[in-house]
Image (cartoon, rainbow, N blue to C red):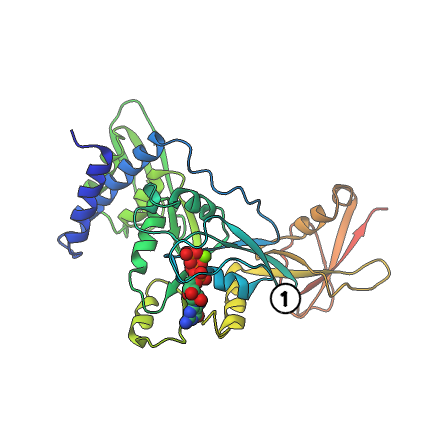
């Protein structure tokens, strides 16, 4: 009997050789489901080894540099942070994770330089599994590309195989497994996937009795990512490096179908400020300033939070006692129309809000 690896290889070959169109759409969905399930089996066989490089997260957010070897990841780390990571004109110069800190607009952003990944990284090639387990925990992924080298879809594919889905969001799907009763599906009318295909995919994951609740429009990839479990949905920026070298503009244009593209040259330091700004934007961080009792505002050291954060998070960061004695907060700031806003703990903050916290004592 073929080993799991051999079956994975066969499926990959078939996937590669199947052109995507209306007629093959369903078949491709099924191939992907099979592949995903087999990879799950392979991962659980190979316990251990996927532990990462034990770099603790630090700062306000973590960004991982991912790409083929020799594309300039370490050069970029050195440009973005005060850290020095070794640079070499050959593959696999970097052999472990090297962290650095980017200070930008008051935020401290941890940047992780990682060893290059190659095809089959997700199933163990190179230090692939360690690298990918670091990537899983990042808040943003920079896919670094050498402007002369094609094949970014291979990187995206390896990430997906490792359960890291880029620039898509988790869909609202629920499942309740039963012991009998077959498969029951509830779905809205506009779902981009037919009932028999859903059943085939469920079967592939060895689910024969369940209630499946699909609460919005999904495609087969969404369903597979859901059933696979442990999928992380990450944001990614595509960083095209070495644009100082001769290249084809149309190759760069093609990349925009994957996501936002930033062009840089690490060695001649071009595009680096734009990259910092793009990282900051993509992380959706907001800065909140605190007004002290004296009335002074510390403009140098904002508190950096995620977009959507509420007053409670600020208060909690200050101290637990503050949280229990909290009465209300006063907000002012460039994003506010009213001059002074009196709010409670669940009020959402905006970038550059100035907060005065009023406590009971
Ligand atoms: N021309 C040019 N060369 C660059 C640029 N950035 C990096 N390089 C060169 O590309 C080679 C690889 O750079 P690294 O930063 O070591 O690449 P890496 O992606 O970290 O490589 P690995 O650690 O092996 O995965 C070195 O010779 C760099 O000097 C650039 O913007 N332009
Ligand atoms: Mg390197």
Residue 212 visible: yes
What percent of the width, then of the height, locates residue 91? 38, 56
Residue 142 visible: no
In the displayed structure, 220 sits above or below 66; it is above
Q: Residue furthest top?
A: 179
Residue at x-position 33% and y-position 71%: 252
Question: Which image quadrant is residue 186 in?
Answer: top left
Q: Residue furthest left?
A: 23
Q: Residue beneath label 1, please?
A: 105
What percent of the width, then of the height, locates residue 2? 17, 32
| Left or right placement of residue 166 versus residue 293 in this view | left
Foreground of the two, 78 or 108? 78
Question: Which image quadrant is residue 49 in?
Answer: top left
Foreground of the two, 248 or 309? 248
| Left or right placement of residue 272 versus residue 72 in this view | right
Foreground of the two, 210 or 260? 260
Residue at x-position 57% and y-position 57%: 307
What percent of the width, then of the height, locates residue 41? 30, 32
Element at label 1 = loop
Residue at x-position 35% and y-position 69%: 147
| Left or right placement of residue 294 versus residue 174 in this view | right
Image quarter in which the N terminus is found: top left
């Amino acid at each position: 009997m073929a080993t799991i690896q051999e079956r994975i290889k066969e499926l990959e070959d078939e996937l590669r050789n199947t052109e995507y169109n209306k007629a093959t759409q369903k078949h491709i969905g099924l191939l992907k489901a099979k592949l995903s399930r087999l990879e799950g089996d392979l991962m659980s066989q190979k316990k251990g080894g996927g532990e990462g490089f034990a770099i603790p997260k630090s700062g306000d957010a973590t960004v991982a540099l991912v790409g083929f070897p020799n594309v300039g990841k370490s050069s970029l780390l050195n440009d973005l942070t005060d850290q020095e990571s070794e640079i070499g004109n050959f593959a696999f110069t970097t052999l472990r994770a090297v962290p650095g800190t980017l200070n930008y607009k008051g935020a401290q952003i941890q940047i992780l330089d990682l060893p290059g990944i190659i095809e089959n990284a997700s199933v163990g090639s190179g230090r692939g599994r360690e690298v990918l387990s670091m990537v899983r925990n990042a808040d943003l992924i920079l896919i670094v590309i050498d402007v002369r080298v094609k094949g970014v879809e291979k990187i995206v594919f390896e990430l997906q195989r490792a359960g890291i889905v880029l620039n898509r969001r988790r869909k609202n799907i629920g499942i309740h497994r039963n012991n009998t009763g077959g498969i029951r599906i509830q779905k809205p009318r506009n779902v981009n996937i037919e009932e028999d295909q859903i059943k085939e995919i469920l079967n592939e994951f060895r689910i024969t009795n369940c209630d499946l609740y699909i609460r919005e429009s999904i495609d087969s990839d969404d369903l597979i990512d859901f059933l696979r479990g442990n999928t992380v949905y990450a944001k990614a920026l595509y960083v095209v490096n070495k644009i100082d070298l001769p290249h084809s503009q149309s190759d760069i244009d093609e990349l925009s179908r994957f996501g936002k593209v930033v062009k840089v040259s690490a060695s001649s330091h071009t595009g680096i400020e734009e990259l910092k700004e793009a990282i900051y934007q993509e992380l959706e961080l907001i800065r909140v300033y605190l007004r002290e009792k004296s009335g002074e505002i510390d403009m140098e050291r904002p508190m950096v939070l995620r977009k959507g954060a509420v007053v409670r998070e600020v208060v909690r960061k200050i101290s637990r006692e503050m949280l229990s004695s909290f009465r209300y907060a006063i907000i002012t700031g460039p994003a506010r129309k009213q001059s002074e806003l009196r709010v409670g703990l669940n009020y959402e903050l905006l970038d550059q809000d100035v907060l005065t916290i009023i406590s009971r004592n």
